[in-house]
Image (spheres, rainbow, N blue to C red):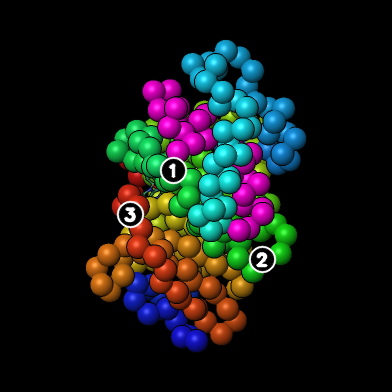
Amino acid sequence: MSQRPGFPVKLSQTGASGTARKTPSPVSARSSAQLNPVVTSSQAVRTATPRTASPVSGLGLESGAVRARMVRKLAEQGVQDARVLEAMGQVERHRFVESALVNQAYEDTSLPIGLGQTISKPNVVARMVELLCQNVPGKLGRVLEIGTGCGYQAAVLSHVATEVYSIERLRGLHEKARTNLRPFRLHNVHLIFGDGMLGYPKGAPYAGIISAAGGDAVPDAWLDQLATGGRLIAPTITPAGHQALVVVLKTAQGFERQVLEAVHFVPLKSGVA
Ligand code: SAH
């Protein structure tokens, strides 16, 4: 076992100690949780489904059948964790995409969500959440998601983790996610506007950290904010120069890193916009 992750993970010399970090954002997790009580039980999700007529009514997307079919496909593709399959079956992906794209919401395809960003394919979301849950019996504890985007993955995470802190650097998407998530009343989802490269120290330590954007290296802050025993899943550039899923486990002895399959995520960028 390596004591420290080799490339692509860079470690700070000072570890978790107080390196200066920017204050995350004016919209704190707490204030956003208050403003936006965002579901914990599957029952609550179902009952909170908006019943008003919408451009999607009549397409059969409200029925669980279309999600059940997606879940069967995910299982055929190798997703095994029952918690993850259950969560994927619960969250209505069509409520997170533009109305012109709702017909494609349950296909295994990534879709544009505005501002040049994309929502990952269901298969990639399920794979990453499964990696996050690996070897954790029951619910995960606090999880940090970098890149809220439209809020879909945050909603999936809310079913497998006790608390979800999700940070987005683009104000337009942060607001869109807030709007998308509001009807679901997911009380354990906290949306933060800020630069996720700095992590979100207020919620640390995290049992899991998951990035929806790919960087050249895993930021030090993420490693610092990971709990011992926690795991981090992030698309990262490998020494071979392509982006792959990297899993980092934090143990009492140090970090263990695994490089998995090649992926294509939008870039991790610093600062907010
Ligand atoms: N999980 C999202 C996927 C969004 S795509 C969903 O379910 O929709 C990745 C997101 O990461 C983009 O919205 C992008 O703006 C955001 N991102 C990139 N760099 C970031 C950073 N440093 N901090 C926070 N968000 C970041």
Up/down of 202 relative to 97, above or below: below
Q: Which mark is residue 136?
A: 2
* Residue 77 in the image, given as x and y percentages of width and height: 50, 54
Given the current orientation, which residue lies at the most extreme front position? 76
Report whether 56 appears left or right of 68.
left
Look at the picture and state if 261 lies above or below 43: below
Q: Relative to 8, say whether 191 is above or below.
A: above
Secondary structure at numbered mark 3: loop
- In the rendered image, residue 227, in percent from the top left (x then y), is placed at 59, 68
Is any atom of residue 259 visible in this view?
A: yes
Cα separation, mark 3 vs mark 1, equals 14 Å
- The structure residue drawn at horizontal position 40% and vertical position 75%, both measured from the top left corner, is 11
Q: Residues within 10 Å of mark 1 (few under 14, many from 20)?
A: some
* Residue type at the position of mark 2: Val
N-term mark: 2 or 3: 2
Name the residue carrying label 3. 264
Q: Residue at 48% of width from left, 62% of height from top?
A: 233
The foreground one among 257 and 263 is 263
Q: Nearer the viewer, mark 2 or mark 1?
A: 1
Q: Which mark lies nearer to you, 3 or 1?
A: 1
Quote the CA–CA distance across marks 2 and 1. Answer: 27 Å
| Residue 89 relative to residue 248: left or right | right
Report which quarter residue 88 is drawn in: top right
Q: Provide the residue span drawn in magenta.
A: 80-107
Q: Which residue is mark 1?
A: 108
Callout 3 amino acid: His
Q: In the rendered view, would you say 118 is above or below 96?
A: below
Q: Is residue 30 visible?
A: no
